[in-house]
Image (cartoon, helix red, strand yellow):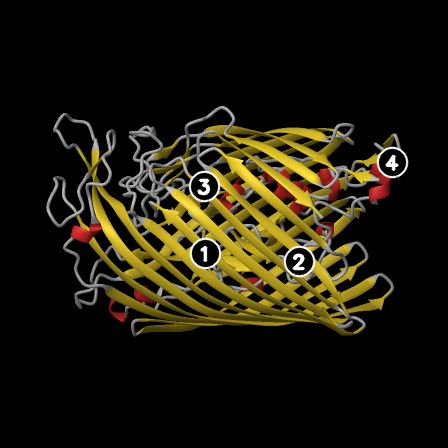
Amino acid sequence: MRVLHTAGAAGFAMLATPLAAQDTGDPAPPAEERAAQSEGEDEGDMIIVTGRAQKLYRVEEVSVGKLDTPPLESSLVVTTITEELIEDQGARDAQDLYRNISGVSFFSYAGVTARGFRQEENFYDGLRGDPYAGFSVPQLFNVERVEFLKGPSGMLYGPGAPGGLFNYVTKKPDLEEFSGQVKAIGGTEDRFGGSAEVNAPLGRGFGVRGGLFYEDRGTFRFNSASRTLIADTGLAMDGGPVRVDVQGTRYDQELDANRLRGVPVDDEGEFLTSRRWNHNEPGDFLNLVSDVFQVRLEAQPVEGLSLDATARYNDAQEVQNYHEPRGLFDSDGDGTIDATIREFRDQLRTQESWSFGGNLVWAAGISGDVRNRLLVGADHFEGDTYFRGRSLRGRTVDTPGLPNPLSLFDPVYGQSDPATYDQGPYTVTLTDSERTGIYVLDELTIGRLILVGGIRRDDFYDNSDGTVFEDSQTTYRGGVVYRVTDEISAFGQYATSFEPQSAASQNPLAGGPFAPTTGDIYEAGIKTALFNGQIQSTLSAYRITRSNILQTDPRGDTGNDGVDDLLSIGEITSKGIEFDIAADVTPDWVVTAAYGYNDTRITQDNAGGGFSNNVGDRFANAPEHQLGFWTRYQFPAIGLAAALGGDYVSERVSISGQPVNPYMVFDASLIYETGPFRALLRVDNLFDETYAASGFIDRTGHFPGAPRSAFLEVGYEF
């Protein structure tokens, strides 16, 4: 029998995709039911088609909320991007996925704008300890799924931004089935590479998996390219009530002519030069080597009691040599900005960290349709970071021993050699950080009513070159869900978050120490899974306030101690509505759409600005409107599927207040599957739209979106 999982070749930037994987309903009907809708025979071969949106692009439980919960029974708003979706998109790194999540858009590197706020920290398997230190972007080869928890998550995960939280769940050995696959890829911009994965049960409750990934690719920016190697191993032991997973991973990434900044723009938000322009020399680089070791234990010693504990160690080193744009200028006096001053930076960052987290869950029926789950947990993180750097700024004219300026319109590379620079000594910064949290979360179900409440206490410590700061903070979460019917739920939640002020900002002469930045959310909405999940939707409205942002005291140095004072009076408010829908129009045709409205504005500052923008202004890189769609049609008789998607982002402003113009891009792909063979052809930016993915500051410009590109990936499963 030949089985064809439908080809949802979504290599697109579709906001809507996760709806099918997000808080949308009860378990899908059995695969046999779906198969019966489009089952046929051809000379003894049976072709079974199962709906992607219903079977593969969604999960039946949300785990990022600590308590595994069916989406319709959760007050959280979570988007889950599954392994199948990652594969169908041919996604390689996190930036390939951001546009799949309503309320999330690209900001810079691994950072995003989430519900109006900048968010940069990533969790792995529920713990701190991102292996991609500094300015590298998470790769997806060894990732099983990506979970994005929207809104403040302080009660669940401790310090963090109020817009949301990414959690990358890594692949573990399967103890039941032997499997493996090999893939090869080739595409535009000199792209080539391949991967191999094997999973093998060993018997007696043991199993192993291993994977190797390598890819070499250029980028559309002059001089820029990347080479990525990931080696991943895992060993699992399941002795009945106890399972133990041991994992080890090496990440090795070489990025030529990085760290990449943007392309300068004018006051209308239009690029001043080609989107391929790069401020870096061919010899510049950003290289990362990161090693991770992790052990996880899961156990269910008695009925109703379960526990898990995970320990994670990460040792990462990132080295950068690059030329930073430091100031645009008119080189020939004709009134046109045509060049930039450059600064050479030589930097080394190392990070060694330990993370631990554990949870104990007791589930019990009380009486009748009343039941309760109680979770008690704790987590701890400690990290030592080392930074060594030096910089040397050039001038508007070529000067021996200094970086030369670079033309925007006719850049000439190779004339500036760091070996000839008169560089000074390195400066070194050592930072030690500790984060410890304990928390309690309770879920009470009374018939169709579900009540959730939690509280957490965090202690945190930072020591940056002898400047020590320590404090504690309490955060809360409350939620309510009412199952209107088996297919419709109404939900509401309130939650808080906090972020410690940096140790460098705690100078007592400036008025420190300062309380952490805080955030809270009020959110309510409706989730549906109609017609046995064939039409799924989520509608939610939220209001997030971020407070206690440090601002310069307009009174200046009130203590006459030579240091200008600071005040924690800044405030930003985000309000929004998000609507997602996914529908299996027919067994062979799926349509998804997502719309997000967001209004993030500065609501309090120091009366003299304090931010790059003013009170009442929209916050930087926070679009008001986002709209995404994706439609896929499959031809099961020939094993082929075709898909088209689009992504629209409305106008934004950069950190410097320059406009970031709206854009809409389209993507298309084809997937062909027959037996163990699978081929994916994907074209990104189908009509070669020139656009800015996000804005930064005026001297570095806007980050340009990639021009049209294509690749072919061929795989074999065994």
The residue lying toward the viewer, choosing from 104 and 321, is 321
Q: Is residue 345 left or right of residue 675?
A: left
The label shown at residue 63 is: 2
- Between the residue at mark 4 and the residue at mark 3, the CA separation in whole angstroms equals 43 Å
Q: Earlier in the sequence, mark 3 or mark 2?
A: 2
The residue lying toward the viewer, choosing from 179 and 278, is 179
Q: Amino acid at mark 3?
A: Arg
Q: Amino acid at mark 4?
A: Ala
Residue designated by label 4: 36
Q: Is residue 336 above or below residue 379?
A: above
Residue designated by label 3: 217
Q: Is residue 395 left or right of residue 477?
A: left
SS type, badge 1? strand
Q: Quadrant of residue 236?
A: bottom right
- Between the residue at mark 1 and the residue at mark 2, the CA separation in whole angstroms equals 30 Å
**In the rendering, at what x and y percent does residue 120 appear?**
45, 53
- Between the residue at mark 2 and the residue at mark 4, the CA separation in whole angstroms equals 31 Å
Label 3 packing within 10 angstroms: few (<14), some (14-19), many (20+): some
SS type, badge 2? loop
